């Protein structure tokens, strides 16, 4: 599916690291938080959003656009069956449902642990309590679904302490547990997944999507379009 996926497909697991599926909200948060910005600068990023992909195309940057859910499901189903998987995030109820659904879908999947942290967890201090359990599980891949930006801090901190692959996949846990429904394919195809999610949870997500998207357009997308247009005009002269 992607070059990153090949990392988990061979006979052996190769290397370790921190990986972040990023969307508009991730970038908006990073623009206001220097600590998060530094994490995203030094660690592996995968575009999980149409607006970011558009900007990357405008700027002629390498663009890897993959939804976290699609990547996670593809890796679980097609990756080396010996890989040991750990799920960190969501709620205990959702993890039970996720485990049940995956057991029916992929009965040979090697799940070595799961943990749902408290909602108001303090990443800077409480993550230390997770290290022992994850280390003892000998997990090859730790899937992290704590929401942005909390999961990005967790992925970075844990990857510095444990030799495993930590991958922040956002709402993938909710979709795999069937606690939330995905947007129809046509909406995902044209970049309107955010609108579907906003209709599902307007009270929780209105600030993220309405204000966040406007901020992203103003600070990143419009300037990028301007650069492209200026370059186009310059070449015409």
Image (cartoon, rainbow, N blue to C red):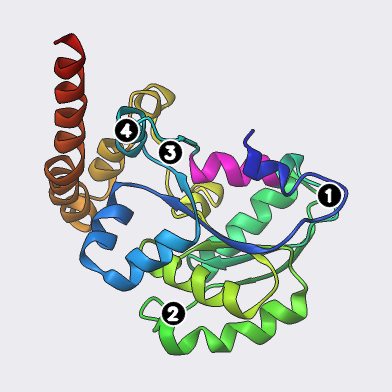
Number of marks in picture: 4
Task: Give the residue drawn at x 14%, y 16%.
Answer: 233
Instruction: Classify mark 1: helix, strand or loop.
Output: loop
Q: Residue furthest front?
A: 237
Q: In front: 62, or 194?
A: 62
Q: Mark 4 against mark 2, which lies toward the viewer?
A: 4
| Magenta span contains residue 88 | no
Can I make out residue 193 in this image?
yes
Task: Give the residue drawn at x 35%, y 26%.
Answer: 187
Kindly report the distance in space between the C-alpha atoms of the residues bearing marks 2 and 3: 25 Å
Kindly report the distance in space between the C-alpha atoms of the residues bearing marks 4 and 2: 40 Å
Examine the rendered structure and indicate whether residue 67 appears above or below residue 226: below
- Badge 3 is on which residue? 182
Residue 81, label in figure: 1
Q: Mark 2 against mark 1, which lies toward the viewer?
A: 1
- Badge 4 is on which residue? 59
Instruction: Classify mark 3: helix, strand or loop.
Output: loop
């Amino acid at each position: 599916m992607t070059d990153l996926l090949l990392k988990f497909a061979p006979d052996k697991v190769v290397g370790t690291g921190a990986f972040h599926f990023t969307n508009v909200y991730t970038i908006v948060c990073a623009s206001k938080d220097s600590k998060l910005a530094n994490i995203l600068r030094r660690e592996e990023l995968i575009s999980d959003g149409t607006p970011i992909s558009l900007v990357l195309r405008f700027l002629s940057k390498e663009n890897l656009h993959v939804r976290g859910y699609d990547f996670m499901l593809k890796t679980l189903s097609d990756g080396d069956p010996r890989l040991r998987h750990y799920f960190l995030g969501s709620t205990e109820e959702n993890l039970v449902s996720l485990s049940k659904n995956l057991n029916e879908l992929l009965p040979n999947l090697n799940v070595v642990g799961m943990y749902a942290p408290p909602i108001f967890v303090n990443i800077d201090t409480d993550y230390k309590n997770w290290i022992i359990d994850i280390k003892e599980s000998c997990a090859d891949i730790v899937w992290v679904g704590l929401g942005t930006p909390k999961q990005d801090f967790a992925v970075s901190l844990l990857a510095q302490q444990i030799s495993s692959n930590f991958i922040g996949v956002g709402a993938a846990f909710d979709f795999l547990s069937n606690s939330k429904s995905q947007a129809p394919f046509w909406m995902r195809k044209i970049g309107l997944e955010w609108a579907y999610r906003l209709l599902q949870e307007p009270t929780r997500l209105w600030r993220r999507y309405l204000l966040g998207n406007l901020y992203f357009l103003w600070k990143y997308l419009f300037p990028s379009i301007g650069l492209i247009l200026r370059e186009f005009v310059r070449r015409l002269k």
